[in-house]
Image (cartoon, grey):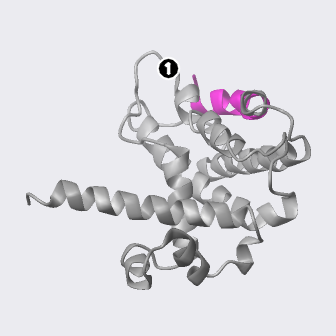
Amino acid sequence: MANRPDTDRRVRKTRTQLHDALASLVHEKPYDEIVVKEILARADVGRSTFYAHYRDKDELLERGIRDMLRIDVSRPSASGTSATDRLLAFSLPFLEHVEQFRVDGELPLDAIRAAPVHEHLRRVLESALGEQLRAERGCRPSDTSAVPSDLFLRHVAASFVLTLDWWLEHPTLSAREVDSYFRALVAPVVRTTDGR
C-alpha cells in the first residue's frame, strides 16, 4: 500500500499523456482517421499500457471529455448556487479549455472534422448531466416537470454541441461570450424544468 500514491501519480501521468496526445491529433486530422498506434507514438506509451487503461480510442476520448466536463455529482447542493448554475457549471471551463487551442484568433477545427468528437461529447454530456440531475432531484421532492428528463437532457447536451459548432463559425468570440449565449439558450428551460 505504501506504493499506492506513486502508482496513482503514474496512472494519472499516463492518462494525461494519452489524453493530450489524442487532443493534439484531433486538431491535426479527422478523428476517424486517427489510429491507436499514432496516439501511442505521440504519448510515448506502450500498447499494453494503453489497453490496461482503455478499451479503444473512443473510450479514451469519452473519459477525457468526462474529465473536461468536471461534473461532480457528489456535491449536488453546494451552498450559494442555484440548481441551474450547478447543472450548467461545466460549460465555461469546457469552453475555456477549447479556447486554449486557438491559434492566431482561429479555432483549429471546422464543423465537419469536429462532428465525430462532438457526437461523443453530446453522448457523454447527456449521461453526465443525467447523473447530476438525478443527484439534484434526490435532494428534494419528486419532479413535477412537464418535460421528460431524457428529452431535457438531450436538449441541453445538443444545445451545447450546437453552440460549439456555431463558435467554430465565429472563432474570434471569447469562451465567456460563447458561454453566455449557451446559457441564454438553455437556462430558461433548465429553470422551468428544475423549478429553481
Which residue is nearer to you in this view: 38 or 150? 38
Give the residue at x 68% y 49%. 157
User: Is 43 drawn above or below residue 99 in the view shown?
Assistant: below
- Check if residue 184 falls in the magenta segment: yes
Q: Position of residue 83 (x, y in %)?
A: 52, 27
Crowding near pointer 1: few (<14 within 10 Å), some, many (20+)? few
User: Is 109 drawn above or below residue 147 in the view shown?
Assistant: below
Give the residue at x 60% y 66%. 22
Q: Position of residue 80 (x, y in %)?
A: 45, 15
Is residue 194 among the parts visible in the rendering? yes
Give the residue at x 38% y 78%. 49
Give the residue at x 65% y 33%. 190
**Where does the magenta region start and end?**
181-196
- Check if residue 182 falls in the magenta segment: yes
Is residue 120 among the parts visible in the rendering? no
Query: From this viewpoint, which residue is outermost toward the left?
Result: 2
Which residue is nearer to you in this view: 129 or 32? 32
Q: Quadrant of residue 11?
A: bottom left
Element type at marker 1? Answer: loop
Q: Quadrant of residue 135?
A: top left
Residue linked to disc 1:
81
User: Is 127 drawn above or below residue 70 in the view shown?
Assistant: below
Query: From this viewpoint, which residue is outermost toward the top?
Result: 80
Q: Quadrant of residue 74?
A: top left
What amino acid is at disc 1?
A: Thr
Which residue is nearer to you in this view: 102 or 59? 102
Is the N terminus in the top left, top right, bottom left or bottom right quadrant? bottom left
Query: From this viewpoint, which residue is outermost toward the right?
Result: 169
